[in-house]
Amino acid sequence: MKKVAISLGDPNGIGLELALKSHSTVAKLCKPIYCIDQNTLNKATKQLNHPVPKDFKIFGKYNKVSINPGVVSQSAGEFSYQSFLTAINLAKEKKVDAICTLPIHKESWAKAGIDYVGHTDMLRDIFQKDAIMMLGCEKMFVALFTEHIPLKKVPKALKVQKITSFLLDFQNSLQLNEPVGVLGLNPHAGDNGVLGDEEKKIIKAIKKANKKLESNIFEGPLVPDIAFTKNSRKSYKYFVAMYHDQGLAPLKALYFDESINVSLNLPILRTSVDHGTAFDIAYKKDNKLSNTSYINAIKMAVT
Amino acid sequence: MKKVAISLGDPNGIGLELALKSHSTVAKLCKPIYCIDQNTLNKATKQLNHPVPKDFKIFGKYNKVSINPGVVSQSAGEFSYQSFLTAINLAKEKKVDAICTLPIHKESWAKAGIDYVGHTDMLRDIFQKDAIMMLGCEKMFVALFTEHIPLKKVPKALKVQKITSFLLDFQNSLQLNEPVGVLGLNPHAGDNGVLGDEEKKIIKAIKKANKKLESNIFEGPLVPDIAFTKNSRKSYKYFVAMYHDQGLAPLKALYFDESINVSLNLPILRTSVDHGTAFDIAYKKDNKLSNTSYINAIKMAVT
């Protein structure tokens, strides 16, 4: 059975509860190693009134943290950073096969002086590689060519060479044997240039990437508002979106609860839930926590 | 029973087949007046091997047109333009309560020297009003603040006064008693300015519109990739999208077959199917035509 290091995320969010309540399911899918210390674990289990499962294997050293549900704090930021770093190191040292991350809180990281925008950003820095952010579930995956940049900067970010490299990195990571739909940028994919001409660059990049791969795996540019119809999804399970909301709005409209986040093009495999810390329901009784995204992330980590 | 003028769209597309095969259903919902002449109707019914229904009321004078399935032509462009104009005039003269349009082909219009981008554009010109394009179905509607412009032009098109007027026109047309979700422009709706700041304008416009309407009907800016999740759709049935694909990609991912197009803020009510001429299947045997969008458009026309 594969080993997966699990970083617990922000201790004031839902990460710990998810990990504890889902442990029996997770333990059937992999050998989990939880990146947390006994002291913090005890505090959390007490607040949650949930016993520590017997085979709950923990690892790593951490600063002291007090648990205050739903609160942004420096110590919470430090803990979630250390938990993530511990998981990364376990993967770097090949002590685990993959890592799965629970949600951190950006503001807690900022309070702790950690200036990464998030997990993927930190992975890029540590490995000095252009990590690719892909989100989705078994039915549909979307990789994002641009992510957390203002919409007005998207059109200029589309450069033939960058898109080509992205497509090559994407396919080198996944080794797919099926067509991948690459989206256009403009309404109606530009309507032959009448509604924008960035599609010319996308076409060039698709051609270059396919030539290099000696296979016409990348198809497009697809008309963005038609790409995700039921019919179109019969032709494609994998999509490359030019910007954040182009891919994620349709994905989340269809499969929000099931979706996960995968970092591609890195020396390690990292999967993640596709939701945040949910401070509003953290540590609350009867909060009806859904663990679908978490379990799907574990499944993806062991494939 | 309300009267609805139906323009047949491009005679080389699926419009005529839809109208003929759906007539018995349509006739239960309204009194349809089909904007076509006997000669063209006979040609079409012959090609379709479908009898003309007895109570198929036609109206208007048209140039001669030959039917060539799936072919772009000047005479087809002229016919579909005349059919639409006839329907508009019937509505202007209050001889019908609403009009419902079947798909035209842009290139046929161009060949006929008609330089409108489409139906909505022509309606704007005829009535000299800022028609609002809204698409959707009973479960969800999306109104588009910008439509057929390149993505790079969208951020600059967001001006406080223009958005405010749009929101007021929207509500004056629909007289809703429920909240309307107004989308942000940037990923995470700008994340407090870190990922773009156009949301400031949207906030100002929402405040101004709500103040004028003396009701907090408009809510937002919503985070675009979360706005259309199942949960968020419990809070909103109506959305205002800042650009074409932001609203239409999620809508079509969820409800492509059912969706229709409505023109708001005009002296007449116009509804339309939300699909094209489907030249690839026009006049073909066993083409499994779906009339869901057409029937929904008729239903909307008579509400």
Image (tube, coloured by chain):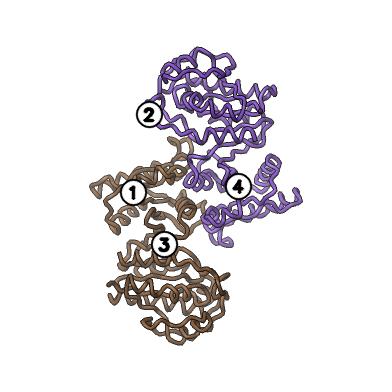
Chain colours: A purple, B brown
Q: Badge 3: few (under 14), some or many (20 or more) residues near its Cα, within 10 Å?
A: many
Instruction: Identify the residue at image location x=66%, y=52%.
Output: A179
Residue A154 in which image quadrant: top right
First along the sequence among labels 4 and 2: 4
Tell if the residue under mark 2 belongs to the same chain as the one under mark 1: no
Rounded to the nearest whole Å, what is the CA distance between mark 2 and mark 1? 30 Å
Query: Which chain is home to disc 3?
Result: B
Residue under pointer 4: A240
Query: Which chain is home to disc 1?
Result: B
Whether residue B244 appears in this view of the structure is no
Q: Badge 1: few (under 14), some or many (20 or more) residues near its Cα, within 10 Å?
A: many
* Quadrant occupied by the C terminus of chain B: bottom left
Mark 4–mark 2 contact, CB under 8 Å? no
**Callout 1: helix, strand or loop?**
strand
Q: Amino acid at mark 4?
A: Val
Q: Is residue A91 above or below residue B186?
A: above
Tell if the residue under mark 4 belongs to the same chain as the one under mark 3: no
Q: Amino acid at mark 3?
A: Ile
